[in-house]
Amino acid sequence: MKGFAGFPAGKQPAVPLPELFFTELLPEVDHLGELKLTLHVFWLLARWEGKKGGRPCVSYEEMAADHRLLDGLASPGLSPGEALRDALERAVARGTLLRVTQASSQAPAGGSDWYFANTEKGRQAVNDLLAGKWTPGEPGKPLLLQAHRPNIFVLYEQNIGPLTPLLAEQLQEAEKEYPASWIEDAFKEAAELNKRSWRYVQRILERWATEGKEDEPARRGDDRKDRRRFIEGEYADYIEH
């Protein structure tokens, strides 16, 4: 392990973090890559804030080009790019970061991803961005909000524990069978009841499939055709279903 020589004498630039980061968020983050990525984004945002013409967001491209970040996210079985995407997915799924994709009509699948801290300032920046008051990238590109729902693997690890190969296969089958919103709600219900097992989540899904889910109609066929993910709340109007 490489040693650290300590912080030098004199005043050093500071990176502000909300107190809730330590009291509510930090105790819940159980993935090292997600934690490293989250801290790195707050650092980048602080650097941009201090620059003339700074912006309240960080691009995927600048993170992907940062070898210090990629080296720190190194994980067995994942390429540097995959490790970065995994950490970003986890942070967006948890709600720590908000993601906006700036896409062109010529290449809707090849847009630029921008990440904002889910703070009052970050949310206001997203609102202003969607209102056309400013743009972080190329002017004239339409903006698509893509704050993804967590995929089933992330939900399992956040609510239950480490995955096994056998469970991974079962989760993949469930993701094909049930709507993404059902899966997320089932994990949430199981966690609230402190029934942290995949079998319990599975029973909830099976019950909803048989008896129907009270707050929405069964739309399994539609959801299988359209796997686009979305965020609930004030940004829901910007998502195409």
Image (spheres, rainbow, N blue to C red):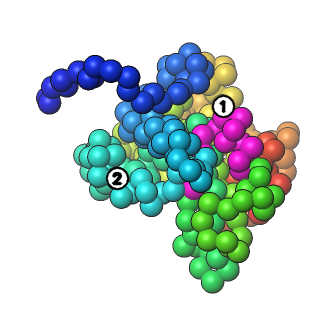
* Residue 213 percent coordinates (x, y): 81, 42
* Secondary structure found at label 1: helix
Q: Quadrant of residue 233?
A: top right
The residue indicated by pointer 1 is: 188
Q: Residue at horizontal 61%, vertical 71%?
A: 138
The residue indicated by pointer 2 is: 66
Q: Is residue 174 magenta?
A: no
* Amino acid on which disc 1 is placed: Lys
Q: Tell which circle, 2 or 1, labels the residue nearer the N-terminal end.
A: 2
Report the span colored magenta: 114-126
* Residue 46 percent coordinates (x, y): 51, 38
Q: Say which of 88 and 228 sits in front.
A: 88
* Secondary structure found at label 2: loop
Instruction: Say above or below: 107 vs 74.
Output: below
Given this view, does label 2 or label 1 mark the residue nearer the observer? 2
* Placement of the C terminus among the 4 image quadrants: bottom right
Instruction: Say above or below: 196 vs 71.
Output: above
